[in-house]
Amino acid sequence: MTTDTSPDPLLTASGLVKTHGRIMALRGASVRLAAGEILAVTGPSGSGKSTLLHCLAGIVRPDGGEVTYGGERVDRLPEARLSELRRTEFGVVFQFGQLIPELTALDNVALPLLLAGSGRKAARTVAAEWLERFGVRGQEELRPGEMSGGQAQRVALARALVTGPKVVFADEPTGALDSLAGEQVMTALTHTARESGIAVLLITHDARVAAYADREVSLRDGAVAEDSEASAVTR
């Protein structure tokens, strides 16, 4: 087993413990994510992968251990600061995208910019640029129910990246897609992340998806079982 020796990690978790009812989802899990690194967290269903992501992103608070981002203890931050981080420096993509069904693709992507204080015209202009970047030009006025799964997930990626975050948390981003759509989504995500120096924490059970990462951490029963260099695909 090898250990990540990246200097000055951007995001760290140390000894995380989290219990859901009587189930201990995390049992002392520790990980590090460097700026610009793509880290795949793998493991079987129920191993604690999503719980780990939620703790790192400040979505839930661990029962024990520490989460540190840029010198701040994420697990101790007030909700207002956590919300600010998720609006500006964190981007999150879930398996089913979680787009707002009543909004068009363009307005879904523009929404984080509007929440951050941008004017509507400026936000929609930037959102259109990101939709084009992710290969969904011409779909701006479609609502989520009118798009294919692959299109909707690329819109979700554009929404997660539109504010220029430093970290993107992607929880099974290809889990609901066929292999071709999944490949398109991962290619778009990793290319953009490497081009922009964005760190990515990628939760996946698929070895083909994990292969896009720089490094892979495997969870078993809520603890890190292995931390090794992933076999990166052509970038």
Image (spheres, rainbow, N blue to C red):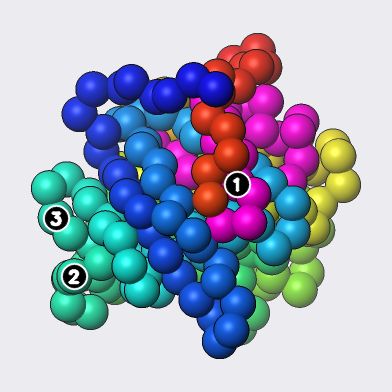
The residue sitting at 50% across, 76% down in the picture is 19
Give the magenta range.
199-222
- Asked if the residue at tag 3 contacts the one at tag 1, i.e. Cβ–Cβ closer than 8 Å, the answer is no
Relative height, residue 141 to residue 11 (above, below): below
Circle 2/circle 3 CB separation < 8 Å: no
Q: Quadrant of the N terminus?
A: top right
Q: Position of residue 232 (x, y in %)?
A: 62, 17
How far apart marks 2 and 3 lie (CA) works out to 8 Å
Label 1 CA crowd tier, 10 Å (few <14, some 14–19, many 20+):
many
> Which numbered disc flags the more N-terminal residue, 1 or 3?
3
Pointer 2 residue: 76
Q: Position of residue 137 (x, y in %)?
A: 62, 46
Q: Which residue is mark 3?
A: 72
Q: Does residue 161 appear left or right of residue 212 in this picture?
A: left
Label 1 sits on residue? 219
Give the alpha-carbon distance from disc 1 to disc 2, as whole Å.
24 Å
- Position of the C terminus, as image quadrant, is top right
Residue 69 point in image, percent of width and height = 22, 49
Quadrant of the image occupied by residue 28: bottom left
